[in-house]
Image: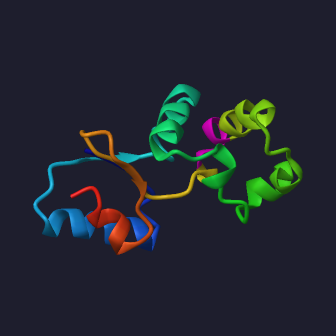
Amino acid sequence: MEIWVNPACSKCRSAVKMLDEAGADYTIRRYLEEPPTAQELGDVLTRLGLEPWDIVRTAEPVAKELDVKSWGRTPADRDRWIEAMAAHPILIQRPIITADDGTTVVGRSEDAVRSVL
């Protein structure tokens, strides 16, 4: 299992604590320091069953600079969103947990984190 975290994020810290308390075997990826590639993001989105705009943090300053709220949300726009997240990983919603069985969640709630245990 791998969890993408920003150590400054309280939701990430809570998810890591839950994994620790459950005795889960996992790897931490500090995705701001080791950003996912566009391919990795595409794979995670497929596993999540979501579109890139579903996991973009639109309130981040860089999102406002890029004006992502005005971007299209069609299949033709998908790569633009993914490339933006790869170039600016702060845009990625967190934490994202990928379990070895293929289960992948955005672990912002206790229920979401429990679902991968």
Considering the image in quadrants, where does the N terminus appear?
top left
**Is residue 34 in view from this perspective?**
yes
Left or right: residue 91 compared with residue 99: right
Counting from the top left corner in percent of width and height, residue 107 is at: 40, 62
Magenta stretch holds residue 108: no
Counting from the top left corner in percent of width and height, residue 16 is at: 28, 63
Residue drawn 64% across the image and 54% down it: 54
Is 10 drawn above or below residue 30 in the view shown?
Answer: below
**Is residue 96 in view from this perspective?**
no
Counting from the top left corner in percent of width and height, residue 50 is at: 57, 47
Task: Report the residue that reaches farthest toward the top.
Answer: 39
Residue drawn 46% across the image and 66% down it: 8
Magenta stretch holds residue 86: yes
Magenta span: predominant SS is helix
Taking depth in this image into account, of 45 and 57 the one nearest to the observer is 45
Left or right: residue 35 compared with residue 114: right
Residue drawn 41% across the image and 54% down it: 105
Is 115 drawn above or below residue 37 in the view shown?
Answer: below
Taking depth in this image into account, of 47 and 21 the one nearest to the observer is 47
Task: Report the residue that reaches farthest toward the left.
Answer: 23
Q: Residue 63 appears in which quarter of the rendering?
A: bottom right
Left or right: residue 64 compared with residue 100: right
Q: Which residues are magenta?
A: 85-89
